[in-house]
Amino acid sequence: MRTILPQGFTGTRAWDALDIERIGDATIRLHWTDQPYKWHVNDGPEVFVVLDGAVDMHTRQDGVEQVHRLNVGNIFHAEDGDEHVAHPLGGARVLVIERAGSV
């Protein structure tokens, strides 16, 4: 057993992760970042929970880009094939649940 305090985790580089658990073919990871990720499409669903800070989640569908502001406690769910990129507003800590090895 362990207790994880997200505010105490800071990586040495953007998108560093603390692996929490692997359940079947899914991973649960705590990420710290202060820089945007990259546009990507997962090869399965992704659940993205903001635990600390705020994140602008950019999505693109049929060539149209939208921005969704995610604050502490907000959850973003991307399905297989959804194009998206996270842009933190300063430092942020997020819990990500996705298929192991996903981009």
Image (cartoon, grey):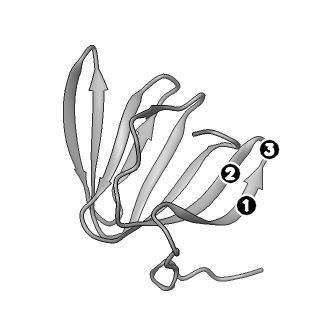
Dot 3 amino acid type: Gly
Dot 1 amino acid type: Glu
Dot 2 amino acid type: Thr
Report helix, strand or loop for mark 2.
Answer: strand
Q: Are marks 2 and 1 in contact (CB under 8 Å)?
A: yes
Crowding at dot 2, Cα within 10 Å, few <14 / some 14-19 / many 20+, comes out as some
Give the number of the disc on residue 4.
Answer: none
Q: Which residue is mark 1?
A: 21
Asked where in the image residue 5 lies, by quadrant, the reply is bottom right
Furthest residue toward bottom: 8
Q: Which residue is mark 3?
A: 24
Task: Name the spot of residue 91 as percent of width and height, x first.
Answer: 33, 71
Distance (Cα) linking label 2 and label 1: 6 Å
Report helix, strand or loop for mark 3.
Answer: loop
Pick the residue in front: 14 or 47: 14
Give the number of the disc on residue 27.
Answer: 2
